[in-house]
Image: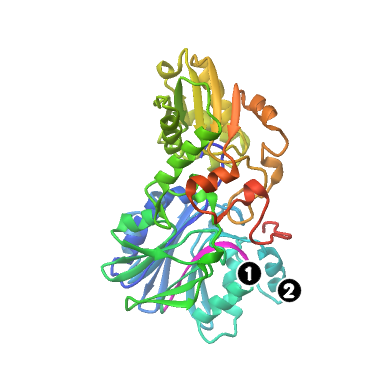
Amino acid sequence: MTDELREACGVFGIVGRPDAAALTAEALFALQHRGQESAGIAVLDEGAIRLHKGMGLVHEVFQVEDVTRLPGTSAIGHVRYSTTGASRPENAQPLYVRAHLGPFALAHNGNLVDALAARDRLEREGAIFQTTTDTEVVAHLMARSRSGSLEEAFQDALSQLSGGYAFAVLTPNGVLGARDPFGIRPLVLGELHGMPCLASETCALTAVGADYLREVEPGEVVQLDVHGGIQVLTPGDPSREKLCAFELIYFARPDSRSAGESIYQARRRLGQQLAREAPAPADVVLGVPDSSLPAAEGYAAELLLPQELGLVKNRYVGRTFINPGQHSRESGVQRKLTVVAEVVRGRRVALIDDSLVRGTTMRHLTRLLRDAGAIEVHVRIASPRYLHPCHYGIDTSNRDELIAVAAGEDHLRQLIGADSLKFLSAQGVLRATGRPDHCLACFTGEYPVPVGDSDEI
């Protein structure tokens, strides 16, 4: 991502496999793009839950010996970034709880908009919190539930909260999966040699050799049992789906699929639609690597322009959204991207990016392209202007950070140093994806889940 959005976390769960921990670790590698602050795995071994987690990338947290020390036939895993709750060790997931109904572990992707109010209420009732995550709110609600089982306690907890979320919960009976009633955050079901699994994206299923079965429906709660079955505990309602548009625009890996749709093909169509709405007087099209390259392909193909490799990414530099401060973000951008001068010298460049949120990277790139000899730089964004904070799992809860809020389009053009600047329309996103059911709240301000006082914990 070129404008420092923190993206959704990643979850995975599997049952009935003697190599459950190893498979989960492999799946987390495939989901690494969804969170780079911490990683963790919880396994079920003869009724007991064992946990290993830590700060850093998956390969930093899990060595071979760490995985071998996690025997068990069912497991869940998590890669995290922080939206609610700071980036520190105690907030790494999964969270492990010993409750009167039995032990369980939770892994969560998304954001609960009413977690702060629920936490205040629980603390008044005597609950003691060990983390600052909204995930622990669910853990306390489950532990205090008067339900007769962990499965019922989980459903009870979800009924008291709202937001955009996908959960994987490990219990002595298997793995529970749940998706918020609007399906804002994604969750899919798969099968590996007759045993079920779930994941945030299909790329994780592919990584472990599992077959895709279907998506967990909005509002659905499922149980993957240790005998290989998938039980629907709470039916979903696909007609209410409002999948986050940024899953298709940026978050998901291009080799993943959403509702049977190739993410790569969807992004290519976004670029084609952008070209129809905002053609640029350019000689060459460049995409900002890596997430914007499919949109750049579509843009170039629609306008019959050459697309060339004019920007090179240093793949040994992590995503710059991980850096907590603006100065470190900017220095990260400078290390991350360089220009192939021979591609841009003396040419008019159409620079395609997936979004413009804080503007850090784009200001730097237009300056780099001009220094390398580009005579004009026309910036085209394959999404609408980002005008409203997200409360469902993207780290833009502070509206003051959004560059498009305080500036009109021409002022934005001047701020980033471009000769022209155009955005894809909201209707263009829906037209390109072929789906009328996306959450576009960050563009339109129309929130599917009321946010109220959704301040972070």
For this orientation, the residue located farthest to the bottom is 148
Is residue 152 among what the camera can see?
yes
Disc 1 marks which residue? Answer: 161
Mark on residue 86? none
Asked whether 15 falls inside the magenta stretch, the response is no
Give how far apart the Cα atoms at labels 2 and 1 are.
Answer: 18 Å
Colour pattern of the rendering: rainbow
* Residue at the image point whose x is 67% and y is 43% from the top: 387
Q: Quadrant of the C terminus?
A: bottom right
x and y percent of residue 134 in the render?
Answer: 61, 63
- Going by the numbered disc 1, the residue's amino acid type is Leu
Disc 2 marks which residue? Answer: 124
x and y percent of residue 246 in the render?
Answer: 53, 48
SS type, badge 1: loop
Q: Residue 224 sits in which quadrant?
A: bottom left
Asked whether 163 falls inside the magenta stretch, the response is yes
* Residue at the image point whose x is 60% and y is 24% from the top: 420
For this orientation, the residue located farthest to the left is 193
SS type, badge 2: helix
Pick the residue in front: 141 or 251: 251
Q: Would you say 413 lies left or right of 61 here?
A: right
Q: Would you say 127 lies left or right of 218 here?
A: right
Q: Where are the magenta residues, as a range?
A: 161-172
